[in-house]
Image (cartoon, rainbow, N blue to C red):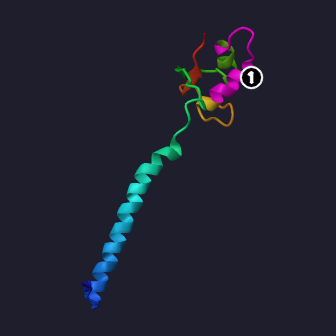
Amino acid sequence: MSIYAPQNPVARARRARTGRVLALVLAVLGAAVVGPQAFATEAGDVAPVVADTYTVGSGETLWGIAVSRTEPGEDVRDTVVEIQQLNAMSGGDLRAGDQIYVPVAG
């Protein structure tokens, strides 16, 4: 028994279209399986951050806010860096009315 596949242009176009659709479906399924893992982190990689929102007052500086949020015996510079990281800040520019994330004191 042999399988007959017509070789006319319409049949070839249909097989090519079927192949492209199948490739697209496989690509979408592959992305659905692998995609979420590309953004996942292992449980021990990142510690959860507890933060409050803080509204910047007139004349306040990043250093001043960090001083008020730093525990005795800790370095204020570390708190400044943590605030910058929480807010994706490259510098220390703040304006009155800005809402920023600050680490929870205590």
Residue 55 against residue 13 in the figure, above or below: above
Residue 23 rendering spot, x and y as whole percentages: 39, 67
Residue 6 against residue 70 in the figure, above or below: below
Q: Residue at x 74, y 22 (%)?
A: 77
| Residue 56 seen in this snapshot | no
Front-most of residues 46 and 71? 46
Residue 15 rendering spot, x and y as whole percentages: 31, 79
Residue indicated by mark 1: 77
Front-most of residues 106 and 32? 32
Highlighted range, magenta? 69-84
On the image, which quarter does residue 10 sit in? bottom left
The quadrant of the picture occupied by the C terminus is: top right
Amino acid at circle 1: Arg
Q: Residue at x 73, y 14 (%)?
A: 74
Q: Is residue 76 magenta?
A: yes
Would you say the magenta stretch is mainly helix, strand or loop? helix
On the image, which quarter does residue 78 sit in? top right
Q: Is residue 9 left or right of residue 59?
A: left
Q: Residue at x 64, y 14 (%)?
A: 69
Front-most of residues 39 and 95? 39
